[in-house]
Amino acid sequence: MRIAKVCVALSSLLLVACTKVGLGVANLPNAFSDTETTKDIAYGTEPWQTLDIYVPPHSSGQSLPVVVFFYGGSWKDGSKDMYPFVGEAFAKQGYITVIADYSKYPQVKFPTFVEDGAKAVAWTYRHIAEYQGDPKRLFIAGHSAGAHIGAMVVADKQYLQAEGLTPSIINAFAGLSGPYDFVPYEDDYKDMFGPPANYPNMQVTTFIDGKEPPMLLLWGADDTIVGKSNMDKLIAKIHAEQGSVESKIYQGVGHADMVSSLVWFLKSKAPILDDVTDFFQRYGANAEKVED
């Protein structure tokens, strides 16, 4: 798989020529909404191990479903501070959203960023009730490299087991344009994931046994960064193991469009938010739990 080195820091988000102005406009609704935002909560001891929580308005005693979202950036770049629009989008659908930062290459190599992802999920499972989230309705979503991180946490049990948990705590996973099964050939990715004997350990398909939470795999037909083969290989392996997977391809949609479609003024690009939340609803998001 070829991962293009364009607009690196914003490789997962194409907004108004990748400018701060574009991000500001995308995130403007959060600044004026009634979504309660709590930023920079530590989920570990390292300075980068922090997360933000977006809680929609809700009635007293009502618990809400929870989405942990991992952003992309080629495992090298990006920040949770770029993604309030994601928290706001899911909040309008009645979800608490957790967006976590994680370690990046070249400061670390695989699997450290996946270990960070598991720590963020474990923290959410154990603490989200403090924000009136329901840990029994926990979902994971991600875009690009973030979809890879989320899928690895779901599929390779070792990551959550290291946190004293199992993937059974996750109701379902939604991946947007994830690089689930590829062989690095660019030098930086060879260094990030190598040596070659280690490549199977970074391929989600290696760990599929049919017992994973249900997966929704989404891809844009105009994506020139992450190839469709990644989704196809994962679907084939899940089917072979008699697991649960659904998929959808969006015509005329590119790699960055997959996440920028969650921006309030770009939603008509593709119904990705509706497709993800519809999928989550079928796996327990609507099973409201009322506290005594």
Image (cartoon, rainbow, N blue to C red):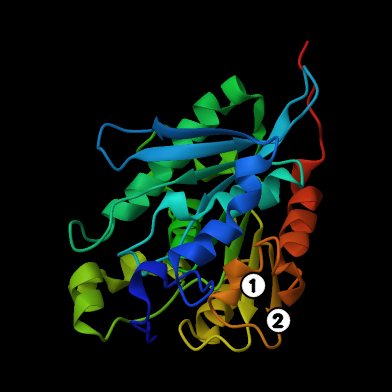
How far across and how far down the image is residue 46, in percent? 25, 37
Asked if the residues shown at circle 1 and circle 2 are in contact, with their CB atoms under 8 angstroms apart, the answer is yes
Q: Residues within 10 Å of mark 2 (few under 14, many from 20)?
A: some
The C terminus: image quadrant: top right
Residue type pointed to by label 1: Leu
Residue type pointed to by label 2: Tyr
Report the front residue among 25 and 195: 25
Where does label 1 land, which residue? 218
Where does label 2 land, which residue? 250
Determine whether, in the image, residue 114 is placed left or right of residue 65: left
Report the front residue among 198 and 91: 91
The N terminus: image quadrant: bottom left
Determine whether, in the image, residue 36 is placed left or right of residue 113: right
| Dot 1 or dot 2, earlier in sequence | 1
Report the front residue among 160 and 263: 263
How far across and how far down the image is residue 49, in percent? 33, 40
Q: Residue furthest top?
A: 292
